Image (cartoon, rainbow, N blue to C red):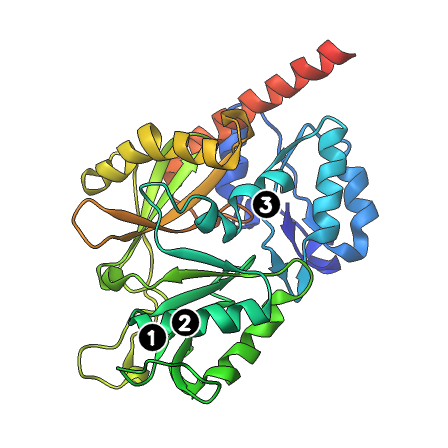
């Protein structure tokens, strides 16, 4: 499943889509895949389709063309309750696929200095107290994608002891094409206010100075690492020393690697043998609840061998390394089989 309009649904062809490899991998294990283009405008049509399949793999971002996933998530919960395997289940996304996971797992060895602001007033009061401590902060909206709603904030002048509404701060959005600005603190707060609508909130994480060493993305199929991505220049990458802030380079391509790539074996070992179990306990999840496909982004910590979690992606993990396809198809076959046994038992 992916998001699209009426024309996209009417003309959907897996073989010509970005999921052609998924279709082929599933066919090789005996699973016939079909496209399910979703839009709130034809929800009932999609409901009928989903109730007639064994499983649905969802690739829909938290926000698509200005709309959130509230109606889709309700639909997915409904079809899951009817016996259709759904990955990722909306309840699992809410536990591990929002920026809240940075706060909920902050005491793990991948954790960092993280706080949650649930109101604008809370953000204003606490952020103004943290900025004079000297380290930049990165504020992230509760649910988002592609850098939207992620902001680096720091004081424009060193030595500032008290942050007032008029205090100048440096502000940079992580969305592609953004440049650093200097604005008054209260102006920055007002920009953030849109992220508190509904159950919105912002997660505040200390800026990671080794961002210049790049970011490692660890792709997993259920509880096994299936590939890696490395991005040398990513969002919020700083300008070279002494250069104007507007000369900061824009994000570059992500390069993909197989799960046995030598330089990532420490991340693989720690993910499978340490972090995964800790995360499940922190989030009160079971292994069998894990999404078929998900990933975790890591920054390099202050010392060699230290890694800091930047986010976990669950809602729409695409693109991904080719090495994911075989394990993904095998896992889907197992899940469909388990679901069928469960339905037979309760029948």
Q: Residue 56 in the image: x percent, y percent?
A: 64, 36
State the image quarter where residue 160 is shown. Answer: bottom left
Using the numbered discs, state the Cα–Cα distance from disc 1 to disc 2 in whole angstroms: 6 Å
Q: Is residue 176 visible?
A: no
Left or right: where does residue 122 sit relative to residue 44? Answer: left
State which tag comes first along the sequence, 3 or 2.
3
Disc assigned to residue 94: 3
Residue situated in front as seen by the camera: 17 or 133: 133
Identify the residue under disc 2: 129
Give the answer, above or below, for where 87 lies relative to 158.
above
Which residue occupies 53% across, 31% down? 285
Q: Mark 1 and 2 residues: CB-CB less than 8 Å, in contact?
A: yes
Count all numbered tags in the image, as a single digit: 3
Disc assigned to residue 132: 1
State which tag comes first along the sequence, 1 or 3.
3
Which residue occupies 60% across, 55% down? 62
Q: Nearer the viewer, mark 3 or mark 2?
A: 2
Q: Nearer the viewer, mark 1 or mark 3?
A: 1
């Amino acid at each position: 499943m992916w998001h699209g309009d009426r024309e996209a649904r009417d003309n959907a062809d897996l073989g010509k889509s970005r999921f052609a490899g998924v279709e082929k991998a599933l066919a090789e294990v005996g699973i016939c895949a079909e496209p399910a283009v979703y839009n709130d405008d034809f929800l009932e049509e999609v409901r009928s389709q989903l109730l007639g399949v064994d499983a649905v793999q969802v690739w829909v971002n938290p926000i698509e063309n200005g709309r959130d996933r509230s109606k889709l998530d309700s639909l997915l919960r409904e079809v899951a309750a009817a016996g259709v395997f759904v990955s990722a289940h909306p309840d699992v996304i809410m536990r591990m696929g929002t920026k809240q996971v940075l706060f909920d797992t902050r005491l793990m060895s991948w954790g960092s200095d993280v706080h949650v602001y649930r109101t604008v007033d809370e953000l204003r009061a606490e952020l103004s107290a943290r900025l004079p401590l000297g380290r930049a902060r990165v504020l992230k909206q509760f649910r988002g994608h592609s850098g939207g709603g992620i902001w680096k904030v720091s004081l424009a002048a060193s030595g500032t002891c008290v942050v007032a509404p008029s205090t100048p701060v440096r502000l940079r959005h992580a969305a592609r094409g953004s440049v650093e600005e200097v604005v008054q603190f209260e102006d920055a707060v007002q920009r953030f206010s849109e992220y508190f609508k509904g159950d919105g909130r912002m997660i505040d994480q200390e800026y990671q100075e080794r961002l210049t060493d790049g970011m490692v993305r660890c792709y997993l199929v259920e509880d096994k690492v299936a590939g890696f991505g490395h991005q040398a220049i990513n969002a919020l990458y700083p300008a070279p020393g002494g250069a104007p802030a507007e000369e900061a380079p824009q994000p570059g391509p992500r390069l993909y690697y197989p799960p046995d790539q030598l330089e990532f074996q420490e991340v693989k070992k720690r993910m499978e043998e340490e972090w995964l179990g800790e995360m499940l306990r922190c989030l009160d999840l079971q292994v069998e609840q894990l999404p078929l496909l998900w990933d975790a982004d890591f920054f390099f910590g202050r010392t060699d061998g230290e890694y800091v979690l930047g986010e976990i992606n669950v809602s729409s993990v695409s693109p991904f390394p080719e090495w994911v396809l075989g394990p993904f198809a095998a896992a889907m076959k197992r899940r469909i089989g388990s679901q069928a046994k469960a339905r037979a038992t309760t029948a």
